[in-house]
Amino acid sequence: MKIKRFVAHDMRTALQMVRAEHGPDAVILSNRRTDDGVEIVAASNYDEALVQRALDAARSEPAAPPAAAPQRAVFPVPEAPPADAFAALRAREAAPATEPVARPARPPAPPRAVDPAPEFAAALAAAHAPAAAAADFPQVPAAAERPARASAEAAAPAPAVAPAPAPVTAASDEQLMEMRNELSQMRQMIEREMARLTDERLRGSPVRAQAMELMDDYGFDAGITRDVALQIPADTEAHRGRGLMLGLISKRLPICPVDPLHEAGVIALVGPTGAGKTTTIAKLAALYASQHQARDVALVTTDTTRIGGREQLYSYGRQLGIAVHEADSEASLLQLLQRLQDYRLVLVDTAGLSQRDRALAGQLNWLRAARQVRTLLVLPANSHHADLDEVVRRFQGARPQGVVLTKLDETGRLGSALSTVVDHELPLTWITDGQQVPGDLHRANAAHLVLRLEDLRRAADRPNTPELDHAVA
């Protein structure tokens, strides 16, 4: 039996050294990490019974004085080996003499190779001594614990004894956050670079640059602005640029092809606080009553907790001669809609809730439970594009089938609302531009909307004159 220690910078290289020296039948006695890398102690022709007898014999002998420190893996050979261990080794070597040796002849082993039994017994005894084990030799497992065999595949990357995975610590979390921040910064840098390249392409054409400036003044989002500007031919004449730009914008606006009032049924209006839902409900009811009869229309409000919420709808109902009903829960709403199924048109005015209000989810669940309800989202045109985008995302649970754009008379940058509609592909149904019932309600038309962009911007930029304000008052 031959025992030898191998040191390499990683476990894979050390296993390859073991296999090259001892063959595929080598037995790994121990392994550990050192300053130089990985250390493996391996043996060939391993016999557990022989090791146990040699270990017992070494323990029965008196402790020998410590020998000089060996060089790396060279074991000192004692001058007087135990007789019984040497005889047992000779008997084992004589037993397989008749078996053919399949391995080819190797060159002479280096001086570090040791012929085993006596020195192995001394090494085992020294390994079980605490002081010696800490100084020179790795700890050898007991005979009752069978060592693991080396893998027959030298290229296998997994080590014989895999180290335990490192626990996730706060430091690794910080590294992960740093990586995410770096990826986010790289993405922003790429987006800025792409925008810069696009801007350079647009600056090369005066008509495109003019279109970008106009759309920016109208309040359009940067993405839509670049898309429209790039569709304008670079050699377009300057006086045709604005008309071509407005035509491209109108083609991108989604318009509902059918008036929901013609289909009638149950229509619910949802939207944030102050969007103009109640006033729009009154305008729709008045318009439908003028075309048909007031008894064909019913109004329903779910705003039963907010002060003054239902009173405004009751006031409109009395003026128009239309019945108003209340629903304060999902069950009551379902029962009420069941009782109102004979009406040709039922308009549901939902509670005005902020898009971040937790009660919003309950309101949307009511509408989802009533499957016969068609939902329209009311968006105020005088809000910023980012705020309108958040409103649309928050009210997606209601599955809106269209948009009512309100308060066009209160904004000079209609492009923000139009950008939101284009981004989310929500068809426009009606627009409102005042408080008159039902005079300030209009069917959405793409051409009319883009033509009003310049009028609204100029109206917003027009200076206030105290004399005119006083005359109006």
Image (cartoon, grey):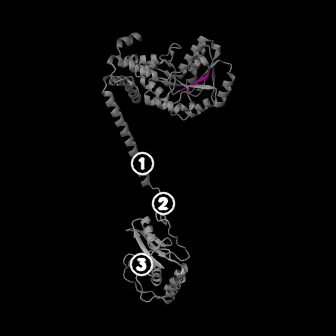
Report whether 71 appears left or right of 164. Answer: left
Any mark on residue 165, and which? Answer: 2
Measure the alpha-carbon separation of dots 1 and 3: 51 Å
- Report if residue 461 is visible in the image: no
Question: Mark 2 is on which residue type?
Answer: Pro
Given this view, does label 1 or label 3 mark the residue nearer the observer? 3
Given this view, does label 1 or label 2 mark the residue nearer the observer? 2
Measure the alpha-carbon separation of dots 1 and 2: 21 Å
Find residue 154 and report its horizontal and vertical position in percent: 47, 65
Residue beneath label 1, please?
177
Q: Is residue 190 positioned above or below 328 on the image? A: below
Disc 3, SS: loop
Q: Which residues are magenta?
A: 265-270
Q: Quadrant of the C terminus?
A: top left
Residue 390 on the magenta segment? no
Which of marks 3 and 1 precedes in the sequence? Answer: 3
Crowd around label 1: few <14 · some 14–19 · many ≥20 (10 Å): few
Residue beneath label 3, please?
113
Crowd around label 2: few <14 · some 14–19 · many ≥20 (10 Å): few
> Contact (CB < 8 A) between labels 1 and 3?
no
Disc 2, SS: loop
- Report if residue 102 is visible in the image: yes
Report whether 157 appears left or right of 366. Answer: left
Question: Mark 1 is on which residue type?
Answer: Met
In front of the other: 257 or 466: 257
In front of the other: 32 or 115: 115
Which of marks 2 and 3 precedes in the sequence? Answer: 3
Q: Is residue 232 positioned above or below 471 on the image? A: below
Which of the 4 image quadrants contains residue 317? top right
